[in-house]
Amino acid sequence: MNMIEFVDVDKIYPNGTRALHNVSFSVESGEFVFVIGESGAGKSTIVKLLTCEEHPSHGSVILGGQDVSELPDKYVPFLRRKIGMIFQDFRLISSRTVAENVAYAMEVTGASPKEIMRRVPLVLSVVGLKNKADVYPAQLSGGEGQRVGIARALVNNPRLILADEPTGNLDPVNGEAIMALLERINRNGTTIIACTHDQNLVNKMQKRVLQLEKGTVTRDEYCGNYYCVSTEKELSPIEDKTEFAQDFEADEAEAFAEFNESTKQTTDRTSLLDNLVQDSESRRTRYSSLNRTEEMKEILKKIDERVKQREAMRRQEEMLSYHEARDGSEENTIESGEFFE
């Protein structure tokens, strides 16, 4: 089943730049695809079209059976929450800890505190950061920062992860560890599209390669290398790297098994639009309930204010009555004195 379809897609930006020209391809559920090409070839535009940050000038971009260019604007935020995003510059919130950065991705979806407390430690274990939960981004290495980015992308169990130059700011060793981590996530059924310039990693991963040149698809090859001609040097698969095997042998492997069991991908027969409508309705119900709670607080506050006003008025009336009674008593005393005089 195709998760993504681009059908005769053109994208021309307002300044006249043609980013994509007659692009057509499809990606099946569970695939791992590298999108390669020089800067300006159109890689980022493909990502922006999938997240509805941009719309095609011509053609259709279909995600989960839904033409996302025809999606009502009110459902776009819900669509983006179903896609895991991994960025080259990590984009972590510096004032939040590692755990809080990951939890934030769940908070915006309305997940319960109980579910957040259960899932965040599990995902941090999956990416090998269970001991860094209370650390701030500034205290992390580049590889650790990107693992937090992967944990954040993974925590809501998305069916699609878009990785935009995920190893661009990393050294080769950390880059390989990150790609091996994505490989494991992909085996769990998550579709991954990775835009990259890293020739070495593409050659080692031997996945499907979609090459763009000046906005046009020039190559679509399974088990492909970065270039059509294979390198003479023998390449060892990333999974066989000693560093990675040692790094993920014990606790992380166990966490992966638990994570896979708790987040097995299932075939959902409902359309993407139906899912987004359900998400929107669920959020509206939650906020409606919250609003009713706030409304009740406001009503109780007003009642309390009225009670205080009435109490103040009652005390004022009692004070006036007291003064009137006292004044009347003094007048009677004066009148009696005058009479006896």
Image: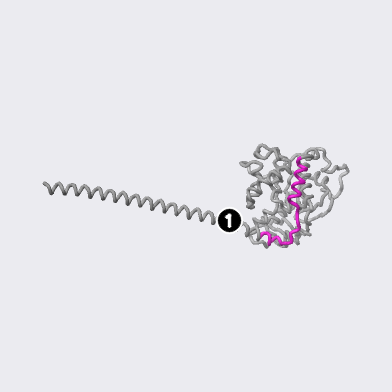
Q: Position of residue 26 (x, y in %)?
A: 78, 58
Q: Position of residue 29 (x, y in %)?
A: 77, 56
| SS at badge 1 | helix
The residue sitting at 79% across, 40% down in the picture is 249
The residue sitting at 15% across, 46% down in the picture is 337
- For residue 210, side relative to residue 69 (left or right): right
> Chief secondary structure of the magenta span?
helix
Where is the N terminus found, in terms of image quarters? bottom right
Q: Which of the 4 image quadrants contains residue 289?
A: bottom right
Closest to the observer, 257 or 164: 257
Q: Is residue 252 visible?
A: yes
Is residue 256 a member of the stretch shown in magenta?
yes
Give the residue pinned by disc 1: 287
Q: Position of residue 76 (x, y in %)?
A: 65, 57
Closest to the observer, 224 or 335: 335
Q: Position of residue 189 (x, y in %)?
A: 77, 52
Q: Is residue 212 above or below residue 181?
A: below
Looking at this view, name the residue that lies furthest to the top.
139
Q: Which of the 4 image quadrants contains residue 268?
A: bottom right
Q: Is residue 40 visible?
A: no
> What residue span does the magenta drawing correspond to?
251-276
Q: Is residue 238 above or below residue 45?
A: above
Which amino acid type is shown beneath numbered disc 1?
Tyr
Is residue 204 a member of the stretch shown in magenta?
no
Closest to the observer, 97 or 218: 97
Q: Which of the 4 image quadrants contains residue 288?
A: bottom right
Q: How is the image coloured?
A: one colour
- For residue 313, side relative to residue 330 (left or right): right
